Amino acid sequence: MSNDFFILMRSELGIMLIIFFLLFLKVWDGITENKKILQIANVLLLVNFMLGFILNANGELFNGMFHTTNLINFEKIILNFGTLIISLQAYDWLKNHKHVIEFYILLLTTLLGMFFMLSSGNFLMFYLGLELASIPLAALVNFDLEKIKSSEAAVKMILSSAFASCIMLFGISMLYGTTGTLTFVELPHLITGGSLQVLSLIFVFTGFAFKLSAVPFHLWTADVYEGSPVAVTSYLSVISKAAMVFVFISILNPLFENMQLMWYNMLFLTIVLTITIGNLFAIRQQNIKRFLAFSSISQVGFILLGISSNSTMGVTASIYFLIVYIFSNLGAFSVIAIVSNETGKENINDYKGFYKTNKFLGWVMALSLFSLAGVPPTAGFFGKMFLVTAGASKGNYILIIIAALNMVVSLYYYLRIVKAMFVDENKEPITKVTGSTSVQIAIIICMAGVILTGFASVLYDYINSLM
Amino acid sequence: MNEIGLTHILFVSTILFFIGVYGFLTRRNMISMLMSIELILNSVNINFVAFNKYLYADKLDGTFFTIFIITIAAAEASVAIAIIIHLYRNLKSVDIDDADMMKF
Amino acid sequence: MNSSTVIFYILAALILGGGIMAVTARKIFRSAIYLLFSLIGIAALYFWMNIEFIAAVQIVVYVGGIVVLIIFSIFLTHDSGGEMPEPNLTRALFAAFATCFACALTILYISKQAFIATQNVTIEPNVKNIGRQMLSTTDHGFMLPFEVVSMLLLAALVGSIVIALKTKPSPSNLPEGDALEAEKK
Amino acid sequence: MTNLTILILFPLITAIAVLFCRNSAQIRWTALAGSAIQLILASLLMHSYYAERAAGNVSQMLFESRTSWYSALNIEYYIGVDGISVIMIMMTAFVVLSGILISWKIESLTKEFFFLLLLLSVGAYGFFISLDLFTMFFFLEVAVIPKFLLIAIWGSGKKEYSAMKLALMLMGGSALVLVGLLVTYFKTDIGNGVHTFDLIKISHQHIPLETQKLIFPFLFVGFGVFTALFPFHTWVPDGHSSAPTAASMFLAGISMKLGGYGCLRVATYLMPEGAQYYSSVIVLLATIAIIYGAFATLMQKDLKYINAYSSVSHCGFILLGIGMLTKTAIIGAVLQMVSHGVMTALFFGAIGMIYDRTHTREVEKLGGLLKTIPFVASVYIIAGLCSLGLPGFSGFVSEMTIFMGAWQRPDAFHRIATILACASIVVTAVYILRAAGKAVMGPITNSQYNELTDATWTEKSASVLLTFAVLSIGLAPFWLIDLITPDTQLIMENLARGVLGN
Amino acid sequence: MNGNFYIALIPLLPLATFVLLGLFGRKYLSSISGIIGTLSLLISTLISITTAYNYFLVDGKVNGVYQKIIAFNFTWLQFSPNVSIDLGAILDPISVMMLVVVTFVSLMVHIFSLGYMKGEERFATYYAFLSLFTFSMLGLVLSTNIFQIYMFWELVGVSSFLLIGYYFEKPSAVAASKKAFIVTRFADLGFLIGILILAFNAETLDFGTLIERLTNPASPYLINATTLSFFGMSALTWGLVMVFLGGAGKSAMFPFHIWLPDAMEGPTPVSALIHAATMVVAGVYLVARLFPIYSFDVTALHVVMYVGAFSALLAAVIACTQTDIKRVLAYSTMSQIGYMMFSLGVSSYGGENGLGYMASMFHLFTHAFFKSLLFLGAGAVIHLVHSNEMKDMGGLRKLMPITHITFLIACLAIAGIPPFAGFFSKEEILLAAFHSNKLIYGVALFTSGLTAFYMFRLYFTIFWSKPSYANASDGRESHAHAEHGEGTSTMKIPLIILGACAILAGFFPIASLVTSDGAALETHIDIVFSIAPVLLAIGGILLAMNLYKSENDKPQKLAISLGGFYTAAHKKFYMDEMYLFITKNIIFNIIGKTAAWIDKNIVDGFMNFLAGFTALISELIKGLQSGKLQQYAIYFFVGVIGFMLLFIYIWA
């Protein structure tokens, strides 16, 4: 226990400190005004986010249960950043909510869970992190307390995620049974591809697939996204997903290196299904959150495509894409948050004629959607290109063709919304909405990201250098 | 104890696992589903303990895993029950098939 | 066939029987009781394996905690005595078929697997060892997970409280049918 | 004029400047000034290109500049021009300027309209100067969304359907291109297993025959979708006819050329053997497009549909020229791209002017416009005459070059294809004259037409500008030929390297 | 004479006029545009005459042969190192002759139009178009390159289109202009393919080189071109026939003649210029230009011959039945060009055998004068009567004496009555036919009789027939006409000049100037030989006089007695209907509609189907997302089992 402890665990410690501080606030009862609390929380998150940059350190703690590298540190920074943005965009919603502090405690706990998951050195820590990241999340999903949809979503979320983690646990137990260890360092040599290990790979893989909402394990996603409060939806679709992707990257190949062919084939199947089915469902959605749920499912397919390349290129591309994805998705969610909060409208049809009344937000939404669709000059184009490039590096062209064609389908549904906003007539368009300064800051950051990330190769190079 | 080895225990746990799965897939009462989850978790626990006991007794990894799983199961159950009850207040039903407002 | 074996089979029967009854019983309350039996059986299995600590935890947490929680919630949802709705027949059949199939497959592979026990010095899973390792930060210490779990429990607590606090649903947010129902009541 | 980046930066800056304008007059003038200066820049580029060539610079690409962009993937921002690009840029500048002039009267969402137009032009300029396939692809796709929005917002008729169809089909095309590019990329090796997107370097690599056979269709069809390759042309009629005038001009004039340029520069140049292997298929499809497009045009009743289908037919010539794989034919194809670019822009401009006044594009409803709006009607007739390949206009030069080149393939299949292609010029005459005869000549069908006012100064300048371009190609093709021939020679040399032989 | 760049002025002056009048005429130069056009053409004409003078008399022959002189030439469009389209000017006997004819006739028409078109709203445009036409025609004549000729060919076509459609508000004029353009364009397709064939085989487009390469029996190009065969004809034959097709189109030979009568919708002076004297002989000129090659290929030459002869006969027969004076003249034009055509067809290259060639050129020369005279005369008549129909005319000789006399001269000339111009040229043609092919001779002879008949039918109907125009039913209108008189002096002067030419042109020593090989050809008028045609012509005239000199019912009776044949001829042997059927039913309804249908339903349908199909699948699988959690769990579990099966049993 030395200085290392504080340096290596600074993100976790920071989050914990914030949690305890907020608990203190709750108990102390000194500050009761929501706005103040929100401001404090945002500032704290900002500080925590900054903290991530100060030092880079590789190392492990607790006998290898906790380890961190530059890459993991960077991933945590990304998650911190996303959480900060979501916190900013949730301002309008939370300022009238009764349980602001609880919201932050739960939110930050899940974030903490993700951090532990990222830094986990064995399956135990991983599992704990996973549960820490999902159980409070279910409570968060239920945070629109008076909305029945919110509860329904929460039930669906907690039951299905419990089911999925059970299945995954079963796989982990098998793995333990065949290897005798749970430590990531020791496992790769012991995993040889025996038949029980195949089973456990399948169980673990499906567990991940569930969390990543890859088809056919995705079915909970849309319902949960639709029912959750906007802030939680964006958190689920961005942060939670990003964290799972990061973990998936650091577990899949390092651990199951000897079973590469097998998991590649699994991925192949999953990617094809995920991209296609995600798209097919996205086409028909009417609720904009639900729509983004399916779109994010399809996006996950692309991320998996990058991961499937099993190379530095693929990992870089995936992480890069996730950053872009955070910008674009949060951009879109910011608009949805404003609209939903001020008018309560969440249907795509409600967005008809949106551009007439809200030029700026219309463009924000359009740019975000273009970025999600992978259309230049937005950063999404670069992200998708790199993913597909990475996917192609394995020489599996069928996969690339399917992915490329699905990009066309996805363009259709993104354009459908753009069309609704820009072209369609509406007798009662959404009135002019602005949102608070905090949301606007979030929007501006996202838009800057969407436009600039692609052109500046710095980010990509930096991620690449972390490998 | 010679005859009853690890494998038998594993059989029991595996069957229990799938009983749990069956329950999860068929019981329409949400609380029942939660109970099925507990069954599954218990089967996993048996696995971990048995492996630890019979194969890898040099460390206590499996045992600890079990302890944590039990803890988490408790936490999960509490949150799940809270949510179910909350939903019940609005929906006046604990039938999972009634919770299908959001679909397609 | 010695006594230990007999005990094992009895325990196995208790566990599995309890489990099966728990997932098939038509009355929810009975179902909970069967679950209790099954869990107790598992605790007994731990005793049988000479892992008393886990067995104790099993009884304390599961039997004393979770099942009680479940039973409470059954009471809270008012229909503890009532029959549960029939499971959807096709769904049940399909699930039965699928689970049996998967179960058979898994068992097949488990039986095929040759498990090799370690030859290293064993550590007794007694309370002392467990306690020592649980709070140690080095050398197979589980201090960190312990802390993490405590965070989880804290969060679960907070979450449960927030959600379970009674809030009045505003009728406007209910679907039409439910709104009507809510008004009636 | 040696820094090519200015060609994309300038329109971009103009586009952004447009966003900061306060009223529509400012917007128009900014856009006009920007595109006028862009035309000057393009002319300067051409001038310095000539000067450089005259000074004996024989390198394949001039004014090259490269900056490492995504170094991990060896993606570069690599730009440069050869003769072909130079004239494409010139053409684009002409069309953009006149498109802006024609759109002078756009009243709704003026700012967005001009912004998107300029953005579209950025895509085109960038595409033509890129020498890195990634960059090229980037610019190719940049142009898609502005097209969608332009049609969907300012269009007419079933604009939403058309816009969506256009965007999806073009995206589908670029998806195919993407697959092709990626496979190509991974087949290249410039040492140490490093792959490259560098067009020039790839052209020196020997991509295995099997790969070429696999990939050429992707690249060619992908780009082909942009240039209305049969049977992927159906976005053309709907898209063009629904688009606002300037967008039609851009679409037919510039955007369809991106495809042709890509087919030539990427597909054929990089995959010489693939091109030879699939040559007959291309010729077949192109011939079908030409003939079938022409016949389909015969039955159209809407001025824009007529021109759109005729674009299918005319762009078939581009593909035919490329597919014939003879030097003359390829020169012809390039000429056809330029020629069709300006010609069809003029045509759509004329149609737009007619529509603005009469509010109909139905041939049957129009009539006698030559009497009431002689300028507009004359422009329509001039464009029509150009379209049907009248000597003195650009169409003649390019079509004849393609025919001459095509005829050099002596086997019966290519002969028949050539003859059928030639035959299309008769059909072209039929539909052009039918439309012109009914719409602008003949008695006045609607008494309201007597009240119409003739072209405004902006419309006049746009027409004059494009007519000038059409005529300058048509009357003095030799300067273009000088520009194109050396580069075509290089393409031919690459083709000759192919083991399949000709 | 190399470096005689001033030749370029001949076409460029009209071009300049066109640009000037086209751009500014309507607004600024409306009143003086006629003067400008006429003056510039006058200069052109003078230069051409000077050129002709220089060429024939000053430079003269080298070794007894007129040389081909390339006045200037520059590469316009390089296809490949050998093959390029050049723009240049060639001077040889036929081009020089044509220069003079074109500029001269055009000048006459310009002058005539000053009066005829006066007061037209688009007066300037008219002169612009006339200048454009003159420019194109001159460019065509001067072409050094087969592709150059094609280019100007098209330009001529389009100027013709513009001029026919001059009265664009008349639907019939628009239709006629379209028809003219499209029919000739269709023929030009043949021309283009012919060019491609010839250029491919000779690897050049330059006339000189082309002729040299394809006429030298030892040249590999020729051997190649004659051995390659396609459907039983050699490449060379195909090429030549195809080129002839183009010529046939522009020269209104059967079966492309249908546009010519309709083309009379244009202003009458235009008809005189384009559809009588200049453009329509372009086909003849083209064949003459390539004659050395044609003479090598009997098949091609036979095609020329038979098509020419058949057209001559057909047109003459139809002309006898038409009632629109301009149409009669149009058919007569077609018939006369048929003469020129088959005259080329019966000819062969060089020396005495080249008689047909010479005769053809001679007839072209003379025909230009008397036919333009006829048209201008008709124009004057129409100007007065405001109608094209014969029935509206009659007894005009008193009202318009000058027109009457000049018209008569022209009729006599075309009928081949000595000593008028037509007699001499027609004589030569008949002689050439007689020596070569008796069948053709017979046809020609019969046709010449018919010619005399229908021309005088026309003459008598217009100028005699009714006792006096003043007695016509509508007195008030006739009074107006009477005042109108013969029009301005600008209209009369050209008639007089052309009348003089129609008399004198026959004495022009063309045999020594324009021959197939450039060497002089000895010709003599064989009195005995001339008896038959002249008698036949006189017979025709007498018959016409008998029938039409005064109003009577003999023509009707005759028509009835001829029955079906008359009707068929009157209906132009139903050619228009046939074409209409083909275009309307086959091209439009069958091919066009099918193509449009396929495009809309199959090709586009497929794209829409793809979209619909995607949506359909989306609809079909929506049940997956049923909202029921257990269903989701089952799918999840099925996924797990699926993976198990796949990866344990299939992909293991």
Image (spheres, coloured by chain):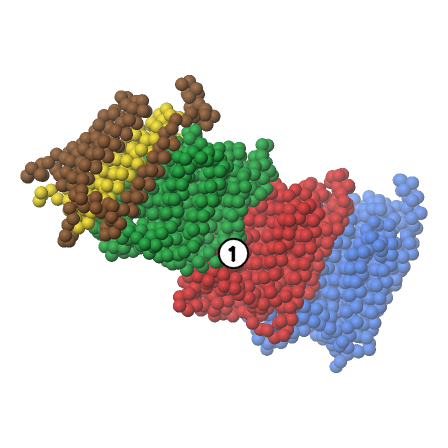
Chain colours: A green, B yellow, C brown, D red, E blue
A203 horizontally vs D249: left or right = left
Residue E103's place in the image compared with B23, above or below, is below
**Chain for mark 1?**
A
x then y, percent, for residue A57: 37, 57
At 15% from the left edge and 44% from the top edge, which residue is drawn? B6
Q: Nearer the viewer, residue A62 or D329?
A: A62
Q: Residues within 10 Å of mark 1 (few under 14, many from 20)?
A: some
Q: Nearer the viewer, residue A223 or E396?
A: A223
x then y, percent, for residue C34: 21, 29
Residue C46's place in the image compared with E650, above or below, is above
At 69% from the left edge and 55% from the top edge, which residue is drawn? D33
Q: Is residue C157 visible?
A: yes
C139 horizontally vs A433: left or right = left
The quadrant of the picture occupied by the N terminus of chain E is bottom right
Residue labelled with disc 1 = A455
Q: Nearer the viewer, residue C98 or B9?
A: B9
Q: Circle 1 — which element?
A: helix
Residue A2's place in the image compared with A86, above or below, is below
At 61% from the left edge and 64% from the top edge, which residue is drawn? D86
**Residue at the extreme top of the image, as rendered:** C184
x then y, percent, for residue D7: 61, 60
Label 1 amino acid? Answer: Phe
B48 horizontally vs D301: left or right = left
Residue D236's place in the image compared with E535, above or below, is above
Q: Is residue A402 visible?
A: no
At 40% from the left edge and 51% from the top edge, which residue is drawn? A75
D231 horizontally vs E321: left or right = left
x then y, percent, for residue C108: 19, 44
